[in-house]
Image: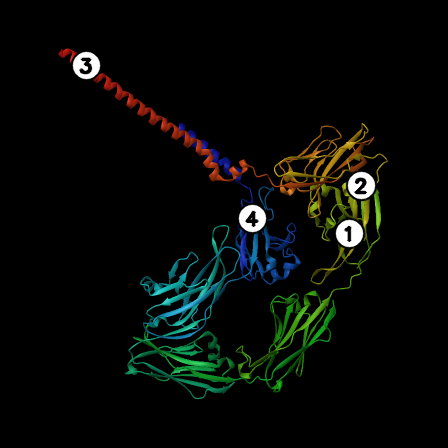
Amino acid sequence: MGLARCLAAAFLLLHLLLGLSTGQRVVTVQKGPLYRVRGSHVTLWCKVSGYQGPAEQNFQWSIYLPSAPEREVQIVSTVDPSFPYAIYTQRVRSRGIYVERVQGDAVLLHITDLQDRDAGEYECHTPNTDERYFGSYSAKMNLVVIADTLSASMVPQVLTRTEGDTVELTCEVSKSTAQHTHLSVGWYRLQGAGERRAEEVLTLSKDFVLRPGPSYMQRFLAGDVRLNKVGNTTYKLSIGGAEPSDQGQLYCEAAEWIEDPDETWKDISRKQTGRTSLAVMSQGRDLSVDIAAAETSLSEGDTLQLNCMVGAQRSSSRHFQVLWLLNSVEVARVDPHGVLIWEDEYEERAKLGQLRAFKQSNVVYVLTIYEVELKDNGTYHCSVSEVKTPGDFHSIQTNFSSGIQVDVKPIGLGLHAMLRSRIATVRYGQSFELDCQVNASYTLKEVPVSVGWLFQPSPPTGHYHELVRVLPSGTVAWGTAQPHFQGKAQLTKAATSFRLRIHNAMAADKGTYQCEVEVWRRNTLTLGQPAATARSNAVGIKVVLPESKLQVSTKESSVEIAGGAESAIECKIMFAQNNSQFTVTWYLLPPPPADANPLKIIRAHYSSILEYGAEFSSPAQKSRFLSQRVSSNIFWLRILSANPRDQGRYYCVVEEWLWLVDGWYKLREGASGRTTLEFKLPEHKLHLEKTNSSISVREGEEVTLHCLLRGTHLPTAHLSATWFRGEESGRTRPLLILHCDGAIEYPQESLVGRLHLRRPTASDFSLTLRSVEKGDAGVYHCQVQEWQQQTQGKDRALEAWAHSGYIWLTTIPPESTVFSRICSSPPLLNFILYLPLVLILLLALAGFCWFFKFRKSKRGSVTGDQLMELQGAGEVRKT
């Protein structure tokens, strides 16, 4: 019965716990910070749980940039296409940034080409679908963008080795990433240029473990395949006892790995080196290979024929596979059955009948290129491998022919392009033209010509984007990188001149333009390789925004105000564009000896976003300083419950923003005149001690700074006081505020507990600073205000105020005493602590030894006396 009750109680508790957790929404993002290299493809996951509503939840991604950590910049949303801010709209539309839904309540944010400006704090937010708000609806993580410093290089070679030789390859790998990263270095082998899957030879993993490929496991265990680090950046691969199966294209691949906060390792960069061609010839077998060409000096469009001859005994009963190589890269192969396999880049030309390779006999193989191109220039080899059976993939022996050099002369000589523009500076909305003039040593009408227009935005992004290309057939192909040009660009052609006209210029059209002309052979139009190409000079186009008419009133003024009252500072716009929007920022220049630099109070963005300055970001300050637009051209800074600390010169800075075709643009900004805010007080004055003084105090000690009020005061008067400290930077900051009701406010929370306001009398406002630190040095002064209760209501009016003289406080390092030196030296402290104990133990041991020796000697004396007595007694008995 007891067991049943325990089980029932356990089930009830479990039900209650599950009931409490039901419906609590939790949003989780990938743990940060993440470090990723510039230019890489980055994914960030986000998921939500504990929600109510549909199974498919929506997600919204935003970023908080380091330059404005409190301002949310919207990036992409799964539900709202208008969610992205202007700076992300284009990247979202072009799928440079997009959200992949993994399941209904989990997504991945993709950034395909990471940029420096993508660094910041990312926030994933899920709009509410619950009946009530319960739980978390967003989560944040940090992404840091770092430079890609990984490099890997290996000198490309063409190596020919005899079976049994040793092959050695070195790879230089380096990185200079500031974060803690690991490297992995490996070698891979491709049997041919068209082979897409590389075979792993040997890899040194990021965990410093050597891992051979499956085909090299036995040779690695036998010590024939090794990888050694022979320098800070040099890795050497050694293959002992080379075999014919080792031949192919060898390259080195390096990867840089970083450990993410979730303790998983991520490869943030990979680099491959150039390839080394390795051929391994068998020993002691009768196989010779020769290559011959009918003509080795050709012009574009001529025919090249190469013959590969195999010399071998009883050749008719043997099986050969032949590879054709250009500059050590495979072109085609003919297997023992005579089946021809082209590499990918030659397959299209072969389909068009421009290439042909076949097995003429078992010992003669032919390669024909009917219309040679410039890329066919180079050194040709043929490689012959003998196999046991036609279907065998392992060669018995392999031999290479000597190289034959083929030179192809270009026919596109003398092609030039010159780009001109009548105007380099264009007003917004104006049209402009670019004229591409082409010259050649032949008549352009006789050959097919294509023209491409290239554009690099300003500021430069590192490379040019293709805006549009007119193909020889007249087809117009628009690029995808700059889609805003389509529909506003006009293309025309006249003889040797090509013209691009762009209507309604906007800011995104500003940048550098080029034209690229391609000349084609008529029979190679569909192969994607022109006979000649010429790119023009670069022409820069500057787009000037509409002229700003902004004019802000610079009239100087002054305002007198009584304490506790409300004041308004005016900012007036005299002239501006009719459809402009304004961002107004208010600044304060405090009176001496306060800051010389202006203090930012509040920035009212044209989109109604408010940003407070660091000195005015507390809740109390935010409630007293308000920015208000009272008309289309007049803005007020309202100061509620003004006090003497608000005295100074106020001014505004107005930014004029205009919506153009593709976004908001800042046209101009202007600053207003200064408005001086002063306090007008009654004749009654406060008298504070004005004498300046200097105090030096040792660190760790206590110091009292005096602030004494002289004279008598009205019985209805209420006093408040504020202590200030001037720092080395020139900034004066409040340390402690005593309000009229006796409440004490600490603007700097780090000083709570070390500041104490002494009040032995009502006129004494002295400040005690406990446990002085080095950073406490500075100039101190106090300010006292006298307030009078109003006849009606609870408000008080400021009657008088005054500030004390200045106290220069300097700190002295703590004195080095014998006790402090002992405490700062653990060995000396241990010696002093344990020395008395050791001495006491030694004294106790000496006393014990002395006592034992004394007892022993006394016992021996007693025994001797007894023996004498016995002997004496015996003698008596004898007589």
Residue toward you, 246 or 226: 226
Choose mark 1 or mark 3, whichever is in front.
3
**Residue furthest out toward the bottom:** 294
Q: Note whether 786 is above or below 513 in the view shown.
A: above
In contact (CB < 8 Å): disc 2 and disc 4: no
Please, what secondary structure does the residue beneath circle 2 have?
loop
Residue toward you, 754 or 478: 754
Q: Note whether 249 is above or below 49 in the view shown.
A: below
Residue type indicated by callout 3: Gly
Q: CA distance from mark 4 to mark 1?
A: 49 Å
Q: Earlier in the sequence, mark 2 or mark 4?
A: 4
* Residue ID for mark 4: 54
Residue type indicated by callout 2: Glu
| Mark sitting on residue 580 | none
In contact (CB < 8 Å): disc 1 and disc 2: no
Q: Note whether 733 is above or below 585 in the view shown.
A: above
